[in-house]
Amino acid sequence: MRRSRLVGALAAVLVAVGLLVAPVVAQEGDTVATALRIQQVDSTNPAATEMVVAWAGSAAALESADITVNGESAEPSSVAPLAGADTGLVLVIDNSAAMEEGGALQRARESLAELVQNRPEGQLVSVISVGGSRARNVQSWTTDTAKVLDVIAALGPDGDSALWRGDNSAAGLLDVRPDLIGQVVVFAGGEDQSATRVSLARGAIAATGASVHAIVVEDRGLDAGSVRSLVDTAG
């Protein structure tokens, strides 16, 4: 599979790991828990299986991890951060009118700007806006941090949300870049008013192997359970 401060660091572990931890959907005011997720396994060399995991802690902590393979204990032979150039981050931002109340959109802009500034060096980023009843790729793949920050800052409240269409578009961006380990970060709250169903978005993202990490702002109309289903399917 391909597989977040909001998202977490990636580390490459040269061993087969039989461990999965469930992903998190955080609602406004929640604290995102530490979690480990297997994203990609390469067992071409049985003597040195390479695994990529998403991990919200330090790489050093993985060196002492309890690992079980087919019922037997194992230890990683090497642990190292994954190069940012190997990953692609898609930000799906709900800038519908529902997100203006209480400054939710402003907080989203600030949080995502911090995420972009602190991402791994060389990581590609793309931004999708889902306000105005449509999904727009307002920033195509780029490593230019300043450009991404300008795009995020310029997103103002606009009409209804097209969240599922935006998630489907995120899958499309990753589908044409199979060389990237995909991460999709969703910041949403407005009720989706597009013709795209959540089931279509779930299937499209699952097919890319990307992880999905979501922040749902409460009391804006969006059913957090539907977003959780998207996250769970990606897992």
Image (cartoon, rainbow, N blue to C red):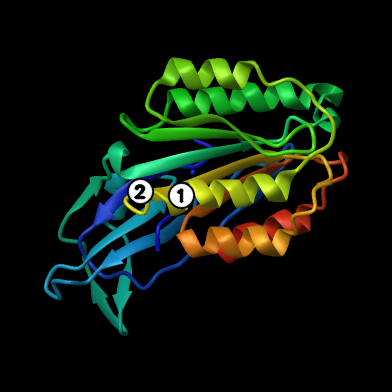
Q: Residue at x 44, y 59 (%)?
A: 37
Residue 91: quarter of image: top right
Residue 22 visible? The answer is no
Q: In the image, residue 109 lies at what x, y percent?
A: 64, 23
Up the image or down, 185 lies above or below 145; here it is below
Helix or strand or loop: what does disc 2 sit on? loop
Q: In the image, residue 47 lies at what x, y percent?
A: 11, 73
Question: What's the amino acid at mark 1?
Answer: Leu
* Marks 1 & 2, CB-CB < 8 Å contact: yes
Q: In the image, residue 190 lies at what x, y percent?
A: 82, 40
Quadrant where the N terminus is found in the figure? bottom left
Q: In the image, residue 8 lies at what x, y percent?
A: 45, 42
Q: CA distance from mark 1 to mark 2?
A: 7 Å
Q: Residues within 10 Å of mark 2 (few under 14, many from 20)?
A: many
What residue sits right under mark 1 in the picture? 174
What residue sits right under mark 2 in the picture? 180
Q: Residue at x 84, y 36 (%)?
A: 160
Q: Residue at x 27, y 57 (%)?
A: 64
Helix or strand or loop: what does disc 1 sit on? helix
Mark before the other along the chain sequence, 1 or 2: 1
Question: What's the amino acid at mark 2?
Answer: Leu
Front one among 206 and 119: 206
Residue 43 visible? The answer is yes
